[in-house]
Image (cartoon, rainbow, N blue to C red):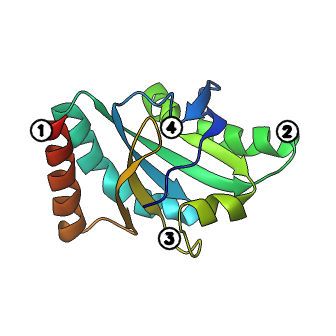
Amino acid sequence: MPKFPHLTAENLNRDEIEIPSQLHGKLNVIIVAFQQWHQNLVDTWIPLLAELAEKYPELDFYELPTIRKMNFVYRRFIDGGMRAGIRSSETRGRTITLYIDKTPFKEALEIENEDTIYVFVVDREGEIFWRSEGAIDQEKAHSLKSKIETLFETS
């Protein structure tokens, strides 16, 4: 399985973070989204991720809206719009916007298209332990819970 690429970006609280090495969890669930409408898909995962993070203190989760490279003015405008729509400082801290050349990023993660979201469980070194795509369903929820449980039991 590929490794999650190492990147530096800002969360919506304007903190610079190295991904995945500076993410808070020993394990982190990363949701990569490409389109604004993908937020509806991302939101299907949040209740389960919050529940798992509560159960496993060394687990955290992040949303990575992934946008093509653009200049500072456009980045500030887009981030400002997202920031204005998110009241919670905790949620803004978990939202890290990537302004990158998307092609090598998608190639590194074996993402074939931008039609849906992609969900990864990674450690701080970038090792990927689990992946899925699209909205959550019972099968994906069970698979994720089982994987997280196994990873924390064996660590």
| Residue 72 numbered tag | 2
Secondary structure found at label 1: helix
Closer to the eye: label 3 or 4: 4
Q: Amino acid at mark 4?
A: Pro
The residue shown at (60%, 41%) is: 6
Q: Quadrant of residue 62?
A: top left
Q: Quadrant of residue 136?
A: bottom left
Q: Amino acid at mark 3?
A: Thr
Q: In the image, is 35 to the left or to the right of 63?
A: right
**Residue for badge 4:** 20
Secondary structure found at label 2: helix
**Residue for badge 1:** 153
| Residue 116 numbered tag | 3
Find residue 2 and report its horizontal and vertical position in percent. Answer: 48, 58
Q: Amino acid at mark 2?
A: Phe
Q: Is residue 86 visible?
A: yes
Question: Looking at the figure, which quarter contains the N terminus?
Answer: bottom left
Q: Do residues under tags 4 and 1 come within 8 Å of each other at their CB atoms?
A: no
Q: Do residues under tags 1 and 2 come within 8 Å of each other at their CB atoms?
A: no
What is the C-alpha distance between the residues marked 3 and 4?
Answer: 21 Å
